[in-house]
Amino acid sequence: MTAASAWDPRALPSLAGRTVVVTGGNAGIGYFVSEQLAEAGAHVVIAARSAEKAQLAMASIRERVADASLAHVPLDLASLASVRAAAEQIAAFRPLHALVNNAGRVVASRRRMLTDDGFELTVGGNFLGHFALSTLLFPALAEGGRIVGMGSDSTRMVRLEPDDLWSERRYSPFRAYAFSKHAVQGFQLELARRLVAAGDSRMSLLAHPGWATSAYAARRAGITDRDPAAGRFFEALTGWVGQGKDRGAWPAVRAVADPDAANGMYFGPQRMLAGRPVPTRPVASSAAPPSAPPSGPTPSRRPASASPCDERRRRALPRFRREQPHLRGRTLCRPHVQLLPPMQVVVGHRGAQAATGARAP
Ligand SMILES: NC(=O)c1ccc[n+]([C@@H]2O[C@H](COP(=O)([O-])OP(=O)(O)OC[C@H]3O[C@@H](n4cnc5c(N)ncnc54)[C@H](OP(=O)(O)O)[C@@H]3O)[C@@H](O)[C@H]2O)c1
């Protein structure tokens, strides 16, 4: 058993023969996660929306790891159609040993924006896109395979309001970002509980990087110098309390590579914002085991104020469910209950309904 602090992020065990998918592996923390896992011998699939950036990242990794085994799969988390297409391509690499759900819209726009399917963009991409990807790839996960979610300490600063997960009542960029991370944390931990209860060897874990900036990271041409000047200035000003994104990658890498990691573990920097990756605790609301399943009557008809995006959600999600081959033949008449129990616990009955569009006709 690795003592919590004895883990050396610079001396990883060999990952030869393992296949790991890293969303957003083209930039920031995800780039360094990909580089470090490739150095340890893993076959790394970079799931990223820009082919050009993914090629740059792969070239940069190959400069350091000449025989790195890498691939790129296009993925835009803000489109369920793209998630479906990516999952299909990624499944060809099965068995998968880990899926690192790293990509994220960190600096959200000042104005509320929507995904292709009509969900608020920050929660829709950071959480729902990853939730969909995880669901689709779950059957391709090897025995003992891991899904690693990227949490955040923003969850300590903003309380989740489950009945406004999609910021329909009120929108602020940081609130939406924190909501997306609450959802990720709650989902991963609930999934872990359910895997343990089912005796499933697969694992659900979390990592957070502390405060990690490009300004303080090892230089990687075309990767660490891509942020806009204002962002670089802000990072240079504040980043000294944290660490570079190369070190910010350590907790997620440990979640993938530590042979002693157990279901539901959450890794973060030793000194909260910086330091070696050690087991840490999530905010209490994410860690709390579910109380009784959300109850209460399902609304018998759609609210009169249903918006065009409600309609788009209603149309998009049933198609998404139909196209999940491993779910065919299951009872889908109440899909928010059948398919999404961990998510329902996270976002409550209303939130799950909103996410699935599963409102009574
Ligand atoms: N940095 C921190 O201090 C910090 C703290 C707590 C948590 N985190 C979490 O750590 C993760 C990585 O953060 P970071 O600082 O490395 O961010 P980053 O440098 O801004 O990189 C974000 C990555 O996510 C990708 N991405 C964003 N939206 C996407 C979408 N719709 N579809 C596919 N890919 C998308 C970006 O792709 P493009 O290059 O195409 O834009 C990029 O690869 C995030 O989940 C973040 O919430 C970071």
Image: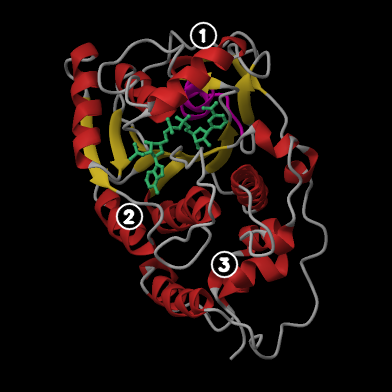
Quadrant location of residue 32?
A: top left
Residue 110, numbered circle: none
Question: Amino acid under label 1?
Answer: Asp
Q: Earlier in the sequence, mark 3 or mark 1?
A: 1
Q: How many marks?
A: 3
**CA gap, disc 3 to disc 1?**
40 Å
- Where is residue 238? Give x, y as percent: 58, 16
Horizontal side, residue 298 vs residue 80: left or right: right
Q: Main SS of the magenta segment?
A: helix
Residue 155 or 184: which is nearer the viewer?
A: 155
Amino acid type, callout 2: Ala
Residue located beneath label 3 in the image? 355
For label 3, the crowd category at 10 Å Cα-Cα, with few meaning under 14, some 14 to 19 and many 20 or more, is many
Tell me how far mark 2 sits from mark 1, CA to CA.
32 Å
In the image, which is nearer the foreground, mark 3 or mark 1? 3
Residue 37 at what x, y percent from top left? 36, 23
Distance CA(mark 3)–CA(mark 2) = 19 Å
Q: Secondary structure at mark 3?
A: helix
Residue 61's quadrant in the figure? top left
Q: Is residue 98 above or below residue 314?
A: above
Residue at horizontal 29 percent and vertical 32 percent from the top: 44
At 53% from the left and 76% from the top, the residue drawn is 310
Three-letter amino acid code at disc 3? Answer: Ala
The residues colored magenta run 248-262
Disc nearer the start of the sequence (3/2)? 2
Residue 1 visible in the current orientation = no
Q: Which mark is residue 8?
A: 1
Mark 2 highlights which residue? 87
**Residue 268: % across, % down:** 62, 23
Q: Is residue 254 magenta?
A: yes
